[in-house]
Image (spheres, rainbow, N blue to C red):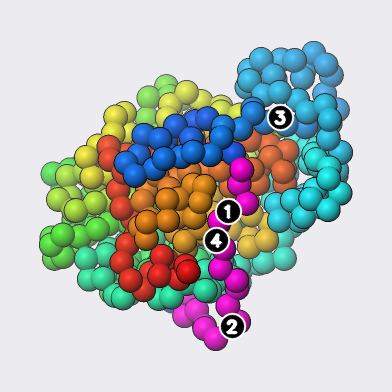
Amino acid sequence: MARSGGDKTAAPPPVTHGEALTPRKLALDIDCLPSDLLAVLRRSPGHSASVRACEPACLPAPKGLSQTDLASLQAQSGVAWCSACVPIDGHLALEDVRRIERAGNVQLCATPPKQLPRRLATDAGDKAYTRVRELYRSLLPAAEDETAIAIVIGNRDYASLPLSETSRNDADAIYSFLTEHLGYAQDNVVLVRDAHAAELAKLLGTEPDAQGDLARLVRAHPGAKVLLYYSGFGATNAAQSETYLLPVDAERYREERSGYPLSTLYAGLSSLGAKSVLVLLEAEFGRDHGAYVLPPNGPETVKTVLPEGPLAGLTVLAAADRGQRTLVDLTYGIGLFTRYLIEGMAGNADLAPIGNGDGKLDSAEIYVYAAEMVELAARKTFGLLQNPVYSSAATAVVSAGSGGALAAKP
């Protein structure tokens, strides 16, 4: 059921198989967790979370700022500036940074300029989503699950906003991962590229009592488990009372007229009658979508992208909150959050010390894995912050059973 906005109607080509499998990990290279992520695990049933809490991490001070400016930034964002690390220019992938640090027994600091360009060169290009299979090529394909339904939206080409650089690659990577490996039938996955406002309304509905195509799809599949993935721009209104998904025909700074409110989205999803709903947001929700990120990339607004309170059956994972900018994974040319979501759902999130190795992937494990790796990569690659967020009324099981991510582990 793949479709898209405009004339771009072709689904991504199928992922090919047959490559040599990568070695399977027995445990993650993580020896501590930030206290907030550790608390998420400890609140979740079945997680002992015996790993220790990390000391607060520092960030390299941006170049060219006075001590007064640095002190002001520190007071605003609560960061501590690093004083004992080796500064480096440019951007290295997290894997390369950690390899150098181990080999030299040093700590590297990626020192950002006063303004970091959003568009960073990668060698991935438009074929990035096919390269993402490196993250899960040892994963055995799951048996097809007729109750698994997904909406995958990638909004890249905006009429009055900058290009959302990775969104098409993000959506194509998620589509391939779901249909090739996680047991989602292609007829149960709606892939939309460059969705206009009318298309979002038709797909998701305008109010809980005026539901759209997704609601009809759920009614046709009793016991449906719904996954909604969105990559593109979001926004917060001037009053900071509402956050929105932005269709490609959105009007700049007129979110109320053209954006799709997250409050409407959450109300509609919670009233679907689905067995569970998982929302994954690879988006930033600030007032501005300019060409530069200002270190340390702290929050710019006060309105959260999460539901006002946990909603039964609804789990939300978002790449960033309160206007914080999202960053790009340099290896795969997709969003940093999307890269680690896929890696976690491919089995890494069930490995110690984050996972409990019980053969089930739950939302707490996936969130903590993705958040830990995103925060680490943002700091080590860019010298910046990026902090994913999570809301769930219960710790939902996201993947379980033979043939899936967990069957791929020894």
Query: Residue 86's quadrant in the figure?
Result: top right
Residue 375, position in %: x, y? 60, 41
User: Mark 3 or 4, which is nearer the eye?
Assistant: 4
Q: Which of the marked residues, 4 or 2, is nearer the chain's N terminus?
A: 2
For marks 4 and 2, give the CA distance: 21 Å
Q: Residue at x 17, y 50 (%)?
A: 272
x, y percentage for residue 237? Answer: 43, 29
Secondary structure at badge 1 equals loop
Task: Tell me if residue 245 can be seen.
Answer: no
Camera-near label (2 vs 1) is 1
- Specify whether residue 103 is painted magenta: no
Residue on which the image places disc 4: 26
Question: For residue 19, which numbered disc appears in the image?
Answer: 2
Image coords of residue 356 (percent x, y): 42, 50
Sooner in the amino-acid sequence: mark 1 or mark 3 = 1
Residue that carries the numbered disc 1 in the rendered image? 28
Q: Residues within 10 Å of mark 1 (few under 14, many from 20)?
A: some
- Identify the residue shown where x is 51% and y is 51%: 352
81 displayed left or right of 249: right
Left or right relative to 383: residue 352: left
| Stretch of the chain drawn in magenta | 12-31
Label 2 – label 3 distance at C-alpha: 40 Å
Task: Report helix, strand or loop for mark 4.
Answer: loop
Q: Amino acid at mark 1?
A: Leu
Q: Amino acid at mark 3?
A: Cys
